[in-house]
Amino acid sequence: MPELAKINLKEKVRRLPHKPGVYLMKDRLKKTIYVGKAKDLKKRVATYFQTSRKHMIAQPKVKAMIDLIHDFDIILVKSEAEALLLEGQLIKKYKPRYNTDFVDDKHFLMVRVNLRETLPRFRLTRNRVDSNSRYYGPFAHAGHLRKTLAELRRKFGILLSDAKPTKVGNDSWQLYDDARQDIYNQPNIVTKKAYYKRMNAACKFLEGQTKEWLSDLEVQMKIASEARNYERAASVRDLIEALKRTAQRTRKFERNQTGLSDHGEAVDRLQEKLDLTSRPSSMECFDISHISGSFCVASMVSFKHGKPDRKSYRRYKIKSFIGNDDFRAMEEVVGRRYRRLSLEKTAFPDLIVVDGGTGQVTAALKAFFRQNLEPPTIIGLAKRNETIIFSDGRDPINLPHHDPGLRLLQYIRDEAHHFANRYNSDLRSQRLRESILEDFKGLGPTKREALMKNFGSFRKLRNATLKSLCEVDGIGPKTAINLIKFLRSK
């Protein structure tokens, strides 16, 4: 490292605060090569630039990394625990070459709810294994998480990984066949619809909607304490603490997407850096996803005041062509979205973001011009250098990696990207499942199409009754019986 660079970095270290946070070491190309956490950023980062650091140089890998450090960024957080969570998040995002501990994602637990199951169970996992499940977390405190899941089972009557429900009627299930059926508050025999209500209530808790439940528990703790039942009061107190820690993880996770506790600050920063005439309180972002031109789909995600407005998310199948053309796909979905809003007389967002560069921005702008619609501000975020492209002819700009406005743009872009990829994966999985029908003798294209049209999805077809199968044109009792056996074996 040149002497001048060393001097500049040491001066930067001197200005660091004695606060918890995460630091990102960069090489000459501004690429993140290492992410670390610290209870005291100033003390920790300073160790990398001390002339006497024999304890670190003893490891050749560490010495090699130090020689490559050309700059660093920091993100301040409120606690050491939050620094640990953000460290893992950033390592998974940037995949720095000198980080090894988090590469396989084995530090944190998540809750997985597999929606392919007839009665989805709540399981612990350390990896995202498919796109057909809901995932909550990751959570830093495994003990608190396990205690929370046990309480969720008692509170809402959900199934955990050890459950083996059995069918006891056309649409009724017995959740447990042992002593547990007597100790939980909910009925042990339920319909699928009733169980889904339980599941969604538990999911809402994991999404952070905990106020009412925690209030009830605090009342219980107070009653137990006043009755001098101190053991019960202490037990409820511990449960409240576990629930709060688990619920806080959802809020921390959302904050860590931008590295900020104040999303409003990021919105204000965008107005300033993008030179917008008004605050971009509403933003929509588009992304295209396909596999070599197959299953071409798009996503639109909506943010209000810097936070996701998930009920407004939309996904699209590309209809105007078949193949691989991101620009045409972008023009199509942007046109469809704002033509509809125009017909509904609904206000356009303050800012439109597209995942891509000049080509994608031009395609989005063309969609407005073709329909004689006045476009709001449109920008593109080009992945390679996170360059911001403008639709009005201004020169592209690059914001510092730690800039709140850039982090918000990255958040909305990544959200759109993941939403589009999930839809693409869902379609591919559905097509793969439907192709199983081609292996069943006696079903031609017409009958296969009739079955899928009648039931809507392979999952519903797989759970169909003999009576409902026989109601489909061309499907007789013998074919229906054999089809049920065939599908249940898959």
Image (cartoon, rainbow, N blue to C red):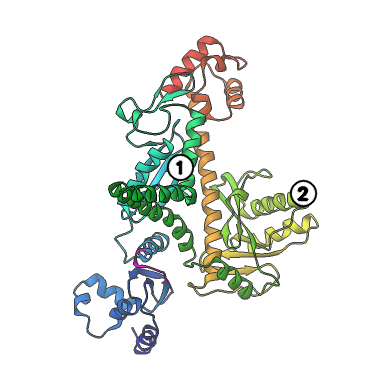
First-in-chain label (2 vs 1): 1
Crowding near pointer 1: few (<14 within 10 Å), some, many (20+)?
many
Secondary structure of the residue carrying numbered label 2: loop
- Residue 373 rendering spot, x and y as whole percentages: 78, 58
- Residue 281 rendering spot, x and y as whole percentages: 64, 64
Q: Tell me: residue 291, above or below residue 173.
A: below
- Range shown magenta: 76-81
> Can the viewer see residue 338 in this picture?
yes
Residue nearest the viewer, comparing 262 with 2: 262
Q: Which callout, 2 or 1, points to the residue nearer the camera?
A: 1
Residue under label 1? 202
- Residue 426 rendering spot, x and y as whole percentages: 52, 40
Q: Identify the image quadrant of the N terminus.
A: bottom left
Q: Amino acid at mark 1?
A: Ala
- Seen at 61% across and 64% down, the residue is 380
Q: Tell me: residue 11, above or below residue 249.
A: below
Does 1 sit left or right of 364 as displayed? left
Q: How far apart, in angstroms, are the residues tagged by discs 2 and 1?
A: 35 Å
- Residue 254 rendering spot, x and y as whole percentages: 48, 59
Secondary structure of the residue carrying numbered label 1: helix
Please, which residue is most extreme toward the right here?
372
Which numbered marker is on residue 344? Answer: 2
Q: Tell me: residue 153, above or below residue 259.
A: above
Q: Identify the image quadrant of the C terminus.
A: top left
Q: Amino acid at mark 2?
A: Glu
Does 1 sit left or right of 307 as displayed? left
